């Protein structure tokens, strides 16, 4: 049987702690060369909608230790609105019913069969949180108590869940440009985490005196700047351009997620892509030589050192997601779905064949 | 609704002529930079089976003119047996029921929705045939009548259907190492094509005096050699190493399918891959500088010349498949499936989501 799962199933079956554990274990496999991951690619073309671009994204990974291969696909209507003074990358829910389109397909490395198909949204969010959480586990001060977060959207919630799972956090201050959003987010996250989350009026007020600064925005422009760097802080980002290059250069230790630093972009000739334009988006961190930096999997596998003193400034750039993460998190979800009887069973024969492909 | 189609549906909905027309039109889009394709990738790891490797393959492409994006996935148990004196690349049907696993997913570039999911086997075979058929249309002599084919397996059939669709073929001679296989294949194809297909005892007997020589094997070693090259012949292959490099170098005009000549191979450290070993497989055509050769889409789009004289020796290397082909052929299948009510409808909501991925 091939399981069809929903985002609700994934939410129920994959806790932050389980995702942290799964990724931590899987990253050792990756650093040791046993796990494999194929860099994200984006095929970009025109679509019928003005100001929008069609993007067919994919990334793959295999975690032999768990017997799972994963393909993650995004079929996106991408726009780049300027909102609250920042250029953003925002997907439009263009599919029937005003919905987004992202899928994960899991396969068995033992008999190749398609094990499960499910939407990617919830897992995507948890694994980004867990990745930055693991970075904080290895790079933030052991006694880190105060968090400053820049952002109050979809990704910000799991960033906080993750940091609270790896450190005893006492206070969180949140800034985002929209006062209503940051207030609602703070109220909601205070209740969820049992930790005081306070909305503040400026980014400076959020990050001043923080032990951990988390950037969790949809911005493709800088939102954290060099003068705000304080001794001993751990900085982290989920989008390449969030932390100003000068601030990255102030860090004593900069760690990246993957050395496959640039997604493959294959675009229709002449297509305009704001995030690939000089001076913004991906180009903003061109001065940082990713190839020379340590990766999070290397630190977890003990091949490189994490934080070495309380004064050190550390910086984690979640520079690009990996298909491999969906194999690791997918293994947990699939195992638990089978144990609990979750999802819909479809005949595997619909997704297999009797002819040599 | 998201359509689930079967190989039988694809076989019924996609004729060789329709596939030839769809690819011919789509290749203009590709050559003009409007269509896009992402090079095939293979994530390769150990599996439980001795002598086998697990391979998670993927390739993507988007054809905006038809409003279709395609992802093709293979989840394969790959082996490299030596059979009839040649090293081969053979997939094992390891999935439940002794089945293979390959899927195509189609998406709309207009509203992103997942339009259809179906096994890849039948379409894979037709588009390989159609690709070499189009190459023959532009490169073989107009009056080509005699075909020699090396191979009698799964791919050989559509090679013959394709050549018969683009030229008035009168005789076909077939060699493959196994006498029983080539006899059965010849009987079957004579009936299907209404053209006399004769099994012969040696490769030389098949290719001597042929106007078109088609290599259609599973071999990853040379099967066609330089002394067999005759003036005016059109040579074609479906696997990189089939035609000896010296024979390729004898051709006046060598045309390739794509300049993305090498798939991305990401493998577990130390994994043994016969096809990547020196002196066989991919390495065998290293002396041919693919980057400098003309591509089939360029010739179809009129950006480069096809055959210019009857004496010219032409050679088409179907050097690597493209995800883009599945968008082009997929557009035909999807349109006809909707017109005829083929396939199973599943709720699109199963494959879309209400959260930002």
Image (cartoon, coloured by chain):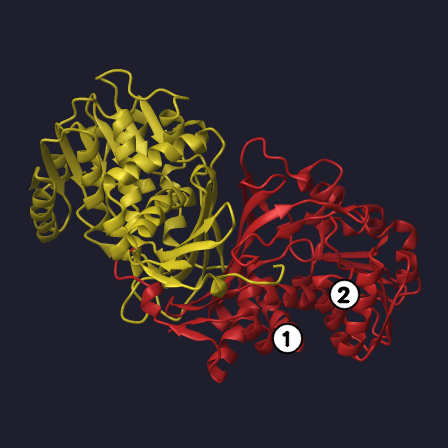
Chain colours: A red, B yellow
Q: Is residue A18 visible?
A: yes
To which quarter of the image does residue A111 belong?
A: bottom left
Q: Is residue A303 visible?
A: no
Subunit that carries the residue with mark 1:
A
Frontmost residue, B330 versus A133: B330
Q: Which residue corresponds to mark 2?
A: A306
Q: What count of labels does the image hold?
A: 2
Name the residue at 61% across, 47% down.
A78
- Establish whether labels 2 and 1 are both on one chain: yes
Where the N terminus of chain B falls, by quadrant? bottom left
Where the C terminus of chain B falls, by quadrant? bottom right
Name the residue at 17% across, 35% down.
B164
Residue B153's spot in the image, x, y percent? 20, 50
Do the numbered discs 2 and 1 sit on residues whose CB atoms are within 8 Å? no
In the picture, the disc for residue A157 is: none
Q: Is residue B354 left or right of residue B65?
A: right
- Which residue appears farthest toward the top when viewing the image? B309
Q: Secondary structure at mark 2?
A: loop
Residue A243's spot in the image, x, y percent? 80, 51
Q: Is residue A222 left or right of residue B153?
A: right
Residue A85's spot in the image, x, y percent? 81, 46
Subunit that carries the residue with mark 2:
A
Q: Is residue B32 above or below residue B335?
A: above
Q: Nearer the viewer, mark 2 or mark 1?
A: 1
Marks 2/1: CA distance?
18 Å
In the picture, the disc for residue A21 is: 1
């Amino acid at each position: 049987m091939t399981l069809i799962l929903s985002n609700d199933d994934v939410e129920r079956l994959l806790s932050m702690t389980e995702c942290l554990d799964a990724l931590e274990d899987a990253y050792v496999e990756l650093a040791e060369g046993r796990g494999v991951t194929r860099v994200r690619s984006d095929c970009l073309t025109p679509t019928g909608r003005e100001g929008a671009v069609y993007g067919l994204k994919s990334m793959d990974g295999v975690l032999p230790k768990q017997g799972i291969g994963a393909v993650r696909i995004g079929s996106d209507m991408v726009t780049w609105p300027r909102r609250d003074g920042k250029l953003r990358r925002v997907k439009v829910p263009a599919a029937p019913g005003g919905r987004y389109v992202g899928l994960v397909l899991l396969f068995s490395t033992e008999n190749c069969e398609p094990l499960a198909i499910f939407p990617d949204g919830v897992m995507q969010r948890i694994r980004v949180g867990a990745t930055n959480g693991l970075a904080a586990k290895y790079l933030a001060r052991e006694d880190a108590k105060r968090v400053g977060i820049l952002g109050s959207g979809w990704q910000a919630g799991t960033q906080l869940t993750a940091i609270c799972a790896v450190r005893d956090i006492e206070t969180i201050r949140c800034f985002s440009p929209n006062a209503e959003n940051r207030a609602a987010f703070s109220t909601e996250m205070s209740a969820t985490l049992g930790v005081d989350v306070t909305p503040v009026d400026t980014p400076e007020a959020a990050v001043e005196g923080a032990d951990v600064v988390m950037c969790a925005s949809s911005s493709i422009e800088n939102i954290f700047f060099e003068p705000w760097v304080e001794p001993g802080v751990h900085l982290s980002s989920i989008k390449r351009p969030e932390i100003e290059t000068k601030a990255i250069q102030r860090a004593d230790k900069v760690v990246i997620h993957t050395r496959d630093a640039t997604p493959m972009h294959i675009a229709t000739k002449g297509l305009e892509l704001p995030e690939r334009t000089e001076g913004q988006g991906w180009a903003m961190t061109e001065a940082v030589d990713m190839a020379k930096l340590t990766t999070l999997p290397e630190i977890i596998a003990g091949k490189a050192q994490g934080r070495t003193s309380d004064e050190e400034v550390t910086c984690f750039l979640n520079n690009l997601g990996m298909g491999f993460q969906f194999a690791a998190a997918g293994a947990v979800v699939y195992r638990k779905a089978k144990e609990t009887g979750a999802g819909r069973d479809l005949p595997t024969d619909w997704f297999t064949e009797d002819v040599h492909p």
